[in-house]
Image (spheres, rainbow, N blue to C red):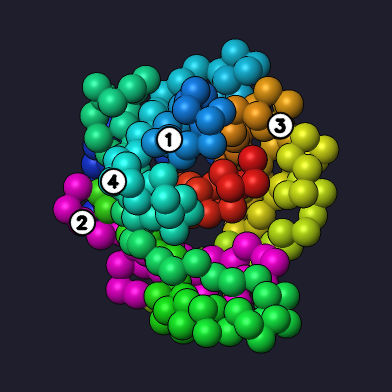
């Protein structure tokens, strides 16, 4: 498999050269009051690089979502959206990266196939889901850095599983697979949810949703950490960050 060993983007990161020394990122989702009414709000995140925000960490980056309100409210995790990562504490900072997710049809839980009456409705959706799985493009300015995509498949198989591809479309990293039947997924207050990032079977990074408080669960305020484990390739670090946000919007935000 192809591997990125050096790119021009590593010379001028538009404010993100801090990644050369950063080993971990701590991400905290902001509270949105409309979430308490069951209405999906635009996701917003604060990122610290030294320690978690609730332990006195210093915010260095901010991520905000843009997209269609109707699609966000009605389609939730299936929606298309753009996340923009800014250097600084809010959207007034310098835009550094964009994560663009396409719309996709929902994958169906396999037990629903036990009921023949659902087949006329479920089967067409399954075909669409298999043909177009969730996909997120990662860009720095107008330059495509890579893509994160769930492996094609019609069924929701109780696991989180994504592949990371470089700009040429070659797979370079694998996120997961991770069971969705774990304690941390079923009850976010009870434990953390750790997802490995591997290259050829060797773990190179981890994405961890830490155990949440009752207040965070009710307010849908996820917290997760990205541990780069000494990874030095700046492009791969950016792709892993994008993969973490895809995990959050696809799985954790729906369970949180």
**Picture quadrant where residue 137 is located:** bottom left
- Residue on which disc 3 sits: 212
Whether the residues at callouts 1 and 4 have beta carbons within 8 Å, the answer is no
| Separation of marks 1 and 3 at Cα, in angstroms | 19 Å
User: Along the polypeptide, which appears first: circle 2 or circle 4?
Assistant: 4
How many marks overall? 4
| Separation of marks 4 and 3 at Cα, in angstroms | 29 Å
Q: Please state the horizontal and vertical placement of residue 29, each as a whole percent of the image.
A: 52, 31
Whether the residues at callouts 1 and 3 have beta carbons within 8 Å, the answer is no
Residue at 59% over, 53% down? 251
Range covered by the magenta-colored residues: 141-169
Q: Is mark 3 on a helix, strand or loop?
A: loop
Q: Please state the horizontal and vertical placement of residue 62, each as a whole percent of the image.
A: 39, 29
Nearest-to-viewer mark from 2 and 4: 4
Q: Which mark is residue 41?
A: 1
User: Along the polypeptide, which appears first: circle 2 or circle 3?
Assistant: 2
- Residue on which disc 4 sits: 68
- Residue on which disc 2 sits: 143
| Separation of marks 1 and 4 at Cα, in angstroms | 11 Å
């Amino acid at each position: 498999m192809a591997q990125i060993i050096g790119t021009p983007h590593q010379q001028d990161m538009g404010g993100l050269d801090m990644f050369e020394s950063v080993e971990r990122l701590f991400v905290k989702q902001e509270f949105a009051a409309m979430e308490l009414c069951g209405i999906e709000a635009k996701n917003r995140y604060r990122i610290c690089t030294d320690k978690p925000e609730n332990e006195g960490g210093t915010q260095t980056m901010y991520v905000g979502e843009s997209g269609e309100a109707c699609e966000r409210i009605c389609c939730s995790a299936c929606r298309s959206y753009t996340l923009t990562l800014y250097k600084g504490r809010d959207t007034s900072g310098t835009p550094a990266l964009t994560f663009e997710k396409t719309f996709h049809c929902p994958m169906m839980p396999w037990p629903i196939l036990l009921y023949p009456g659902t087949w006329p409705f479920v089967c067409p959706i399954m075909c669409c889901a298999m043909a177009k799985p969730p996909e997120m493009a990662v860009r720095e300015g107008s330059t495509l850095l890579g893509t994160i995509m769930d492996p094609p498949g019609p069924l929701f198989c109780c696991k989180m599983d994504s592949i990371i591809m470089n700009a040429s479309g070659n797979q370079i990293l694998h996120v997961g697979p991770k069971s969705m039947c774990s304690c941390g997924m079923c009850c976010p207050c009870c434990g953390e949810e750790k997802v490995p990032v591997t290259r050829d079977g060797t773990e190179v990074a981890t994405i961890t949703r830490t155990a949440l408080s009752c207040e965070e669960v009710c307010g849908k305020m996820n917290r997760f950490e990205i541990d780069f484990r000494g990874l030095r390739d700046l492009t791969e670090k950016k792709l892993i960050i994008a993969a973490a946000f895809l995990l959050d919007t696809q799985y954790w935000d729906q369970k949180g």
